[in-house]
Image: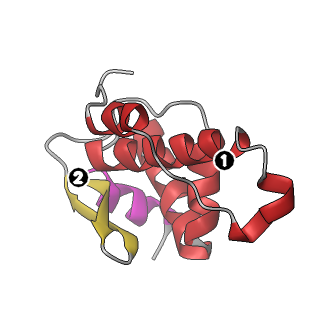
Amino acid sequence: MTEQKIDLDLKNKELISIITPDGFELDWQRAAKQLDKEQINIQKKLFEKFREDKNQLLFYLAFSPPLNSSLSDSIIFLSKIARAFVNKLAKNPDMELLRENITINADKKITGEIINFSFCE
């Protein structure tokens, strides 16, 4: 399939995240409006990172500037979760000592901010 054909197919689709008990998946759904080239390119980049490695996608989302509201609400939500996790992890003084055994507990303030996030960042 050519790059031009892929772009035409994606003009009417938006990338969404589906949160599951075991993690998350990304999928495509029909977009409410036709997407522009920049939106398509951002979505393609995110989907490529997801296909390469889910954890790398989360890392990328955590350190990227806040996503614009032209992406699906679920992708913005996933980005906020990733950013909150890395922020909390970075503030843990035991990170160097515990490394992969570290546990991050979300406090009510962070959970509230994630759940009540604004779509208009």
Residue for badge 2: 12
| 51, above or below 110, in the image | below
Q: Nearer the viewer, residue 101 or 2?
A: 101
Q: Which residue is at the far top?
A: 120
Question: Which callout, 2 or 1, points to the residue nearer the camera?
Answer: 1
Question: Does residue 61 appear to the left or right of 34 in the view shown?
Answer: right
Q: Residue 81, how many percent across, how many down?
A: 45, 47
Q: In this view, does 6 lie above or below 12?
A: below
Within the image, what quadrant is residue 10 found in?
Answer: bottom left
The residue labelled by disc 1 is: 89
Image point 61% across, 42% down: which residue?
A: 88
Magenta range is 3-11
- Number of callouts in the render? 2
The quadrant of the picture occupied by the N terminus is bottom left
Q: Identify the secondary structure beneath mark 1.
A: helix
| C-alpha separation, residue under disc 2 versus residue under disc 1 | 37 Å
Q: Is 48 in front, or is 66?
A: 66
Q: Are marks 2 and 1 in contact (CB under 8 Å)?
A: no
Residue 105 falls within the magenta-colored stretch: no
Q: Main secondary structure of the magenta part?
A: helix
Q: Position of residue 41 (x, y in %)?
A: 50, 47
The residue closer to the viewer here, 29 or 21, is 21
Q: Sequence order check: which comes first, mark 2 or mark 1?
A: 2
Badge 2: few (under 14), some or many (20 or more) residues near its Cα, within 10 Å?
some
**Residue at 64% in and 63% down:** 56
Q: Is mark 2 on a helix, strand or loop?
A: loop
Q: Which of 92 and 20 is in front in this view?
A: 92
Residue 15 seen in render? yes
Q: Which amino acid does label 2 sit on?
A: Asn
The percent coordinates of residue 74 (x first, y second) are 30, 49
Q: Residue 33 carries which label?
A: none
